[in-house]
Amino acid sequence: MAPEKDPPGQSEREESDETLRNSDLASEHQADFDRDAERVEADQAKLQSRSDSDASRDLGRADMGRSGAERQAEGDERLRVERQTSDQAIKGERLRADAATEKGRSHHQASAKSSAELLSREQERHQKTKAALTTREEFLAIVSHDLRNPLNNISMATQNLLEEPGVGKDVKEIASSIGRSAGEMLRLIEDLLDIERIAVGKLTLHFEEHDVSEIIKQAVKQLQGAAASKGVTLEAKDQDGGRHVVCDRSRVMQVLSNLIGNAIKFTPAKGQICVSCQRTGPESEVQISVSDTGEGIAPEKIKTIFERFSQIHNQDRRGIGLGLYIAKMMVEEHPGRIWVESKLGEGSTFHFTLPRRSSAIREATPQ
């Protein structure tokens, strides 16, 4: 009889069941291994805890075995060390504070000494400056007096010659030239004195109402001879009246003389100089202008033309550069403005303004 065959698929099911059983056995073995490891770890932790507890108990017993005197001595020693550390820190801080205080005191003393020395030197310089100013003022006063007297005599003598009947034309021309030179020297002396008055604040103006057209005509008349001697035409432009200003007449005459005098110096023969005035800009001002057909002023010079001792040319010796500076000071004291417009080769025009009403004037009092 032939053996019976297994049903189809039975062999595969048996193999699958075997695999599952093997897997379950492996999982059980792994679980047993993990449990054994946890048990070993727990036992070790218990042993360590018991050991630590025994050590702590032994330490407590040893501490309890010490006498109270020993514990007190140990506490005192800790306190002593702490106090010593604190004292050293306080001492160090006190030393640093004392050093800083001493440094500050030394600096203050040095500063006070330096300030005292600076004050002493400043007072000494002030005294020297005051003495120098006094000496300069006295010197200028003496020189101006000693120079003005003979110059006044020369001016009077030339005027007598010009008015003397029967004097020849040649003599009168010479006398006129002498008179002009004497007048220029007198104006130079006055300029120097005015510079001194401005420097020490002693410039005084006397304000009154004047017709500026009449002042212009007088200034032109006084300088027509000097212009004619150079072949230059000097004229005042016809005014329509109503040009009344509040000013110091003598100082305005001085400003016009300086401006016209400069125009004469720098205008060649056959040139022309014209003085005019007009109401312009603010209603409270009148503008006076002095125009010439001279050589003009370089742009870089215009910025400094009103400074003391300024010259149009570096080698120019037709004056000492005070006229325009003084004119500026006089105009600004009124108060007014002064400026110049110029082109090289075409000529220059100097303008300045004067107030029309007394309310526009600040009080000018000696200082």
Image (cartoon, grey):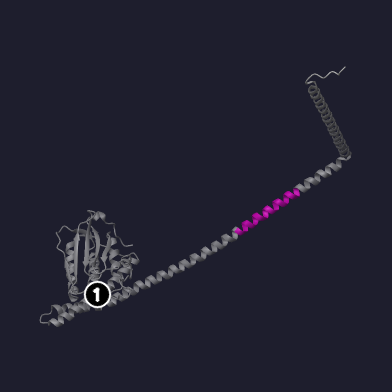
Along the viewing direction, whichever of 34 and 291 lies nearer the viewer: 34
Is residue 249 covered in magenta? no
Q: Position of residue 58 (x, y in %)?
A: 88, 37
Residue 291, image quadrant: bottom left
Along the viewing direction, whichever of 188 and 339 lies nearer the viewer: 339
Is residue 88 covered in magenta? yes
Secondary structure of residue under mark 1: helix
Which range of residues does the magenta coloring cover?
A: 83-103
Q: Position of residue 235 (x, y in %)?
A: 16, 68
Q: Residue furthest left?
A: 166
Q: Residue furthest top?
A: 1
Residue 75 vertical placement versus 290 (above, below) = above
Residue visible at 80% across and 20% down?
10
Decide if residue 181 is on the left or right side of residue 82: left
Residue 92, image quadrant: bottom right
Q: Where is residue 61 in the image (x, y as percent from the top left)?
A: 88, 37
The amino acid type found where label 1 is placed reads Glu
Q: Which residue lies furthest to the front in this view?
A: 1
Q: In which quarter of the image is the N terminus?
A: top right
Callout 1: few (<14), some (14-19), or many (20+) C-alpha neighbours within 10 Å? Answer: some
Q: Position of residue 236 (x, y in %)?
A: 16, 66
Decide if residue 4 is on the left or right side of residue 122: right
Q: In which quarter of the image is the C terminus?
A: bottom left
Decide if residue 122 is on the left or right side of residue 312: right
Residue visible at 49% across and 64% down?
119
Residue visible at 17% across and 77% down?
159
Residue 319, image quadrant: bottom left
Q: Name the residue under label 1.
A: 184
